[in-house]
Structures are given as C-alpha cells and as structure tokens.
Amino acid sequence: MFQYLAQAADKPWQLGPYAGVELKILHKNEATGGLVVLRKFAPGTNVPAHTHPVANEWAYILSGEWVESDLTYGPGTLFHAPKGEPHGPHVAKTEVISLTIFDGPLTLA
C-alpha cells in the first residue's frame, strides 16, 4: 500500500499565479514546500518568461498543445527548468493539462 494517495477528483482547482492558469494541488511537502500539482492552462494563455528561485520544476504534458520557442509540443513531453534558470514564455495553443512537480516552494521571479 502506498503511504499517500490523492484522487484528483477530490481536489479543487485554485487560481494560479497567472491569468488563465489553475492549479490542483495533489500533494504538498510541509517540510520543503515542494508541490505536486495538475496545472490547467486556458487556450491562448501566455505565461511570460520567469524563474523559480528556490525550486526545480518538472512539467509533463498530459493533454493539449503547448508552444515553446516557436515549437509546438503535446502529450508525452517532459520539461525541466532548474531553479534560478529563466524559462518561457509559454503559450497554450489549446487547453493544456500538465502534471508538474516543484521540489521547493512555488515562487516566481
């Protein structure tokens, strides 16, 4: 048996850090502030270039089309942004759902 279980259907969508972005927190590590979240981007959402100063980010696209550096990516794509490294802008061509892991608090710069 797993020590932790989360059912996405039991978790509410919350407003994300940018317009058009919603988060569903599946797990929060109280010791590190790390998060496992589903992220939903409305079609046309544009997330400006940014950094996460204290957390590495891993994002896996579950559905939708995501534009990064003029290339379109779809389901099955894994992105990694090391903490402190700029990434973006990102554009949701369609509604995008990603499973994203931050190994520290979700902060933006």
Image (spheres, rainbow, N blue to C red):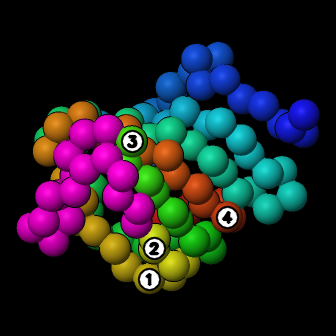
Q: Earlier in the sequence, mark 3 or mark 2?
A: 3
Which residues are the magenta region? 63-79
> Is 99 left or right of 79, judged from the image as shown?
right
- Assess disc 3: are there few (<14), some (14-19) or many (≥20) residues with their C-alpha within 10 Å of its C-alpha: some
Q: Residue at x 25, y 50 (%)?
A: 74
Q: Earlier in the sequence, mark 1 or mark 3?
A: 3
> In front: 103, or 71?
71
Q: CA distance from mark 3 to mark 4?
A: 20 Å
Do callouts 1 and 2 mark residues in contact (Cβ within 8 Å)? yes
Q: CA distance from mark 3 to mark 2?
A: 18 Å
* Label 3 sits on residue: 62
Q: Residue furthest bottom?
A: 85
Amino acid type of disc 3?
Leu
Quarter where residue 105 is shown: bottom right
Q: Residue at x 51, y 79 (%)?
A: 82
Q: Nearer the viewer, mark 1 or mark 3?
A: 3
Give the image location of residue 28, x and y in percent: 74, 45
Q: CA distance from mark 1 to mark 2?
A: 7 Å
Give the image location of residue 87, x and y in percent: 34, 74
Residue 81 in sight from this viewpoint: yes
Disc 1 is placed on an element classified as loop
Q: Residue at x 46, y 71 (%)?
A: 80
Against 81, residue 33 (above or below) is above
* Label 2 sits on residue: 81
Q: Which mark is residue 85?
A: 1
Do callouts 3 and 4 mark residues in contact (Cβ within 8 Å)? no
